[in-house]
Amino acid sequence: MNIKKAAINVIKVVVTVGILYLIFKKFQIGMSDITTALKTSNPLWWVASLGTQAAAIFFSIMRWRVLLTPQQLNVPGGHLTKTYLVGRFLGTFTPTGVGLEAYKAYDIARFTKKATESVSVVVVEKFLTILALSLMVFCSLFAISMPKLWLVAFFGLFGFLLLITSTLVVKPNLLLLILKFPLPAKGKIEGVINNAVEAFNRYRANKGALFASVFFGILVYASLFSTFYTNGQALNLPNGPEGRLAAVQLTDELRTELDTMHIETIDQEDGLSQLFLTADEESKLTAAGVQLLPAASEEDYRRKGLSFVDTMTAGPMTQIVTMVPLSIAGVGLRETAFAGFLRTLGVWIGPKTILAATMWYFVSISLNIVGAIIFLTRKTDYQASREEIDRVLKGE
C-alpha cells in the first residue's frame, strides 16, 4: 500500500512539473521574467491577497460553526479556529481538502466526545459546499463561451448536482428513492446516499442553518477567487481594458519601454512578438515611432488584463478542474484552466496572468504556516476545556 501511495505521489510530482513546464514554455515565462515581475510588483496588493485568503478562512469557520450549533456541539470560537487552521495545514497536499475535513471531524469528536454528530456535520458541510460551488458554476456558464455540446454537458452535470444537493437540504428522504432503481454501481453509492440522508435528517428542525451554510460557502469561494484578481493587481495587470492585437519587432530598447508601460509580449513563430494594446497604449507607441504590425493570431480577443468580474466568472470552473487529483494541490491544472476559461471570455492571456494564477497557491499556503505552528505547539488534553465549558453552560 505504501509503495502504491509513493508511486501515485511520484506521478503527481511528474504531472505537476510537466504541466508547469509546458504552460511556462507556451507563454515564454523564464526565471528572469518571474523575478522581474515580483520585483516590480505592488506589495500592498500582495497583502490584499493574503486578506482574501484570510477572509475565506473566516467564512469557512463561520460555515462550520452554524452547522455545529444545532447538533449541540458547543465548541469555543478560538478552538474552532485552531482546529481549522491545523486541518488546513494537514490538507495542503491532499486532494479536495480531505485532510482538512478528516481532522475537523476527528478533533471535534475528541473534544466533545460526540463522534456521530461531528462526522455528520462534516458530511453535511461537504454536500453544502458542493451546492454552493455548483450554484456559482451554473451561473458562470451563462457568461463562458464554449461549444454548445460542452455547454449542454456542463449545464446537465451541474444541474444534476444542484438537484441532488437541494433535495438533501429540503427533503433528504426523497433521495432514497434513487436506490429503488437498478443503477450501475448501486452498491458503491448506497452507503454514501444513506449516510448523507441520515446526516441531513439531523437538521430537519434547523433548515436555517443549512441555508446559512450555503451562503457562507458562496462567500468562501468568492474570497478565494478574489485572490486571482488581487494577484493580478499586484503584478500590475490592467483591469480588463479593451483593445486590439498587434505585433512588433522586439528590440532591447523597445522591451525596456514596454516593461515601463507594463505591456506584455509573447513571441510568435515568425520572429515577431505579439502584444495586446489599448487605444491609449497604441497611440503612445505610434507617437514614439514604434511600427505596429498585424498579429499572426486569428483568435478573437476583446480585452486584456484581469477584471474582478473575470475572476468571478472563470474562478468556479477553475476550482472544479483543480479538484481533479492529477497534480499536487491542483498546481499546473489551476493555471491551465484559468487561462483557458479566460480565453473563452475573449481575454488575451499574457505571462503575468499565468503568474497570477500560480501565485494563488503560494499565497494560500503561506497562511498554512500558522496552522503548522499551532499543530506543533497545541495541547491535546481537552478535559479541562470541556469542564470549563460545562460550568459556563450551567451558569456556575
Image (cartoon, rainbow, N blue to C red):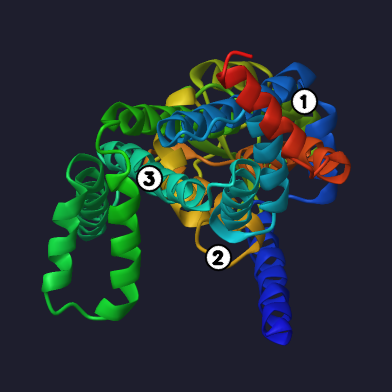
Could you tell me how far apart the alpha carbons at marks 3 and 1 are, in whole angstroms? 27 Å
The residue lying toward the viewer, choosing from 36 and 101, is: 101
Marks 3 and 2 sit apart, C-alpha to C-alpha, by 24 Å
Name the amino acid type tagged 2: Pro
Residue 202 appears left or right of 376: left
Q: What amino acid is found at the position of numbered circle 3 in the picture?
A: Thr
Q: Is residue 236 visible?
A: no
Q: Earlier in the sequence, mark 3 or mark 2?
A: 2
Q: Compared with residue 9, is residue 195 higher up or lower down, i.e. above or below? A: above
Neighbourhood count class around disc 1 (C-alpha, 10 Å): few under 14, some 14–19, many 20 upward: some
Q: Dot 2, crowdedness within 10 Å: few (<14), some or many (≥20)?
A: some
Measured from the top left, where is residue 174 in percent x and y? 14, 54
In the structure shown, which secondary structural element does the residue marked by tag 1 occupy? loop
For the question of whether residue 35 can be seen, the reply is yes
Cα–Cα gap, marks 2 and 1: 32 Å
Query: What residue is drawn where x is 67% and y is 20%?
Result: 48
Q: Quadrant of the N terminus?
A: bottom right
Mark 3 residue element = helix
Q: Is residue 133 left or right of residue 267?
A: left
Residue position for label 1:
41
Position above or below: 366 against 78: below
Q: Disc 3 or 1, which lies upstream in sequence?
A: 1
Q: Which quadrant would residue 329 be assigned to in this image? A: bottom right
Q: Which residue is mark 3?
A: 344
Q: Nearer the viewer, mark 3 or mark 2?
A: 2
Residue that numbered label 2 is attached to: 325
